[in-house]
Amino acid sequence: MVKIDHLLSRVEKPGRYVGGEFNAVVKEWDGVDVKIAFAFPDVYEVGMSHLGLHILYDTVNRRPDALMERVFAPWPDMEHLMRREGIPLFALESRRPLCEFDVVAFTLPYELTYSNVVNMLDLAGLPLAAAARDDRYPLVIAGGPCAFNPEPLADFIDVFFIGEGEEGIHDFIDAFQAGRRQALTRRELLLVLAKMPGFYVPELYRVSYRENGGIASITPATGGIPARVRRRLVHDLDAAPFPTRPIVPYLSPVHDRAVLEVFRGCTRGCRFCQAGMIYRPVRERSMDRLLGLAEELLRQTGYDELSLASLSTVDYTRLRELLAALDARYRRERVSLSLPSLRADAFAVDIARTIQEVRKSTLTFAPEAGTQRLRNVINKQVTEEDLLRAVEAAFRAGWLRVKLYFMLGLPTETDADVEGIAALARKVLEVGRECGVPKGRLSVTVSVASFVPKAHSPFQWEPQAPLEVLAARQARLKELLRGPGLAFHWHDPRTSFLEAVFARGDRRLGAVLREARARGCRFDGWREHFRYEAWLEAFSAAGLAPENYAYRRYDYDEILPWEHIDSGVSKEFLAVEHRRALRGEVTVDCRGGVCTGCGVCPALDAAPRLEVGAGGAV
Amino acid sequence: MARYRVAYAQNGPARWIGHLDIMRAFARAARRAGLPLAYTRGFNPRPKMSFAAPLPVGMRGENEYVDLELEETLPTSEVARYLRHALPPGLELLAVRRVPDGAPAPMSVLDRARYLCHGTLTEVLPPAEIEDRLASFLARGEIWVARRNGEQPRDIRPGIRSIAVRSADGEISLAMELKAGSQGNVRPEEVLRALSEVLPLDPDSFDLARTALIARDGRLLWDCGKVLERNAQRNSGDFT
């Protein structure tokens, strides 16, 4: 057990490191067979908002023969003290060093946490390279959305888990125990795991490269393991466990409320979106199950806000009924309901109106592109009319502020599309004035992110727009959005550049991650810690040009770095979608009953599951 | 409406939690306990809770108080029973008693607090020598200290009511009674910092606990409000 009390009075937020929250599970160490540290490569407040953490923590800790504790990336003030005093990275529940665990399980929520993954291994005192860790060290596994292109972290991770973990984690623990009973060596255990569906052991796959920098082949280095690792998914979400006793942190996490996952998957088919591909098909929880879970969740946490989470909650078939039922049950108890993101249409605003009667702060929409042409390219099926009707409904219902999310640098984007963003924002402002929103209080905020091509999305072959182009378009937009009532927010395109490199990178980038960590790179998603110059030095020290990953157009017939990871959605479908995008053709949502042929259902023996609605559908 | 005073200890992990987070933790615990919390009116209704004094981050609290207002009257034993199991580790319920509606908020009658500070001397001194140095320290008319970040120094001597010392084998315990509340509050760290000029100690390494919160009339805050209650319904706090 590490001693940290003397450090705590010297760090910004000691509550990040002490655990002891309500519903935290502290098991008797010696009575448990398999000990897993769940590692989240960002700060506590971010990690504690991550639903995946709560799901796996609950799933594992329900087993009497296993335990899961938590560890987060220590903020640089704490890291500094830990390094100075030689204190290894420890888990919150038992305060034991990570090296005493059997397994360290990372989740990979976004690419900009990779430097933290490597740094946490270092802080834990583990050899960074998977190949350098022998039987004395914990097994290091990783999952989450970024595991769908695991290659940049291939050097550091023993096993990646591809897909949804509720069932896979049990298979893993069972295999681990069996391996221990049979006294398997680490290498023998890895071979066993590599034969199991959903488990990818990078050191058992060989990658060779072409002279132009692309990949020549990815092949199993040994017999009996699949050429492609197929994603796991939960077929019946109603039968899957859901954490109704999540840890209730003392410190306010980013999202400080109870989370109820209404459904998984989204088939709207936005072509830039990775999540919209890798979580298919749509599986809705039944309304009965949701109401039961909500009841238990609120009783066990004491939260006064319930967030109905999913990739697009407004699409839930029986949403109106669900909201009405929740409202009827919990209004008296002052529980407010929230939806994470809104579709830009009047129905969505109507829904928002029913759940936010009092506090009408800001309403957020994501049209993503400024012209209809470009919205068709990205398959964001919202028209200008939809949006304007939506904001009109919002202003009439009493909202004063509207926030609009866009992406810059989307494929085929021209200056006209950039100008379209500003024009759209001005129209929204105009609607607000017409609705009589007082001048001083009316505000329209435009927030732009830079497009990042993601593995397994229809835009996976697309290059990212060069930094200069993104900067110029941001500047142009900033100019166009001057004026009363308008505000403009943007993200640093350099972080998006780094994100693009790792999103489509291969395993050679492992060398860059080492170099970057050694140069002090961490918390790259945090403006105050992002060190672009150090990253450029790291690339040059590793002899790799980041532009070759971010700016290169990958060929349809080229072997992609993630070719051996099978999401269930066929590469042919992605290519068809990509071609349709370039022609400006939209593709429907299969919720309507028309199969778009993405391939996921036959590949994974799955099917969309929609609540049969009694008048809830729109 | 019914008002209850809850006595609790704050220790373990919870000592590292700031006051705002502790307030939220109490509100959630009350909801989990199913207590019918009363809420303020207005656009942003908040549970009616009134804490005696925020506990500084890092300090243990052995006897802290919060007043909760409920919409219904419940037996104190029931409030205690429900709340005890709903509190997170580190917030330990000690007792619950009724407080009459008209009683002043605990914060408004707070005058001073007692602390126990325990640490190691950086150099061993005989107990008599330590007591002498402490006595001459207290005999000063003024003691000027600055809080950490370049704040104006101020005289804390008027806020020091008493300091008693016990020491043995290089360990030292200081029991302090210091002014508390919104006016003239003195923190034990400040006293330790001033003391470190006359005694060989490192203020940052001390374990600090607040042991009692005391009203102007010298009673524990726990007991304030009892007088008003004399003619009202007798429901005083049995230590559950």
Image (cartoon, helix red, strand yellow):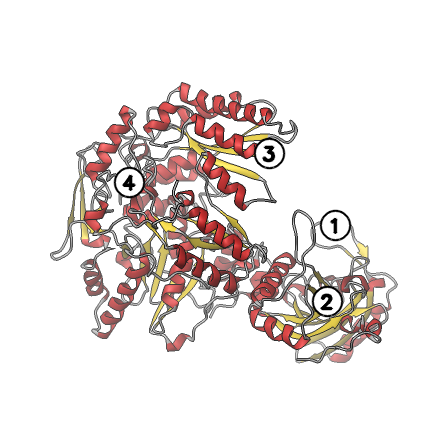
Residue that mark 3 sits on: A400
Residue that mark 4 sits on: A590
Numbered disc in front, either 2 or 1: 2
Residue B76 located left or right of residue A138: right
Residue A178, placed above or below residue B145: below
Q: Residue furthest left?
A: A223
Numbered disc in front, either 3 or 1: 3
Same chain for labels 4 and 1? Say yes or no: no
Numbered disc in front, either 2 or 4: 4
Foreground of the two, A411 or A558: A411
Residue displayed at 43% across by 25% down: A370
Report the Cα–Cα distance between label 3 and label 4.
35 Å
Counting from the top left corner in percent of width and height, residue A161 is at 28, 55
Mark 2 is surrounded, within 10 Å at the Cα level, by few (under 14), some (14 to 19) or many (20 or more) other residues, namely many
Which image quarter: residue A429? top right
Question: Which mark sits nearer the N-terminus, 3 or 4?
Answer: 3
Counting from the top left corner in percent of width and height, residue B183 is at 81, 57
Same chain for labels 2 and 4? Say yes or no: no
> What residue type is disc 3 on?
Leu
Counting from the top left corner in percent of width and height, residue B75 is at 68, 75
Foreground of the two, B97 or B110: B97
Residue B210 located left or right of residue A582: right
Report the Cα–Cα distance between label 2 and label 1.
39 Å
| Label 3 residue SS | loop
Chain assignment, label 2: B
Total numbered labels: 4
Residue that mark 2 sits on: B3
Residue that mark 1 sits on: B151
Mark 1 is surrounded, within 10 Å at the Cα level, by few (under 14), some (14 to 19) or many (20 or more) other residues, namely few
> What residue type is disc 1 on?
Glu
Question: Which mark sits nearer the N-terminus, 2 or 1?
Answer: 2
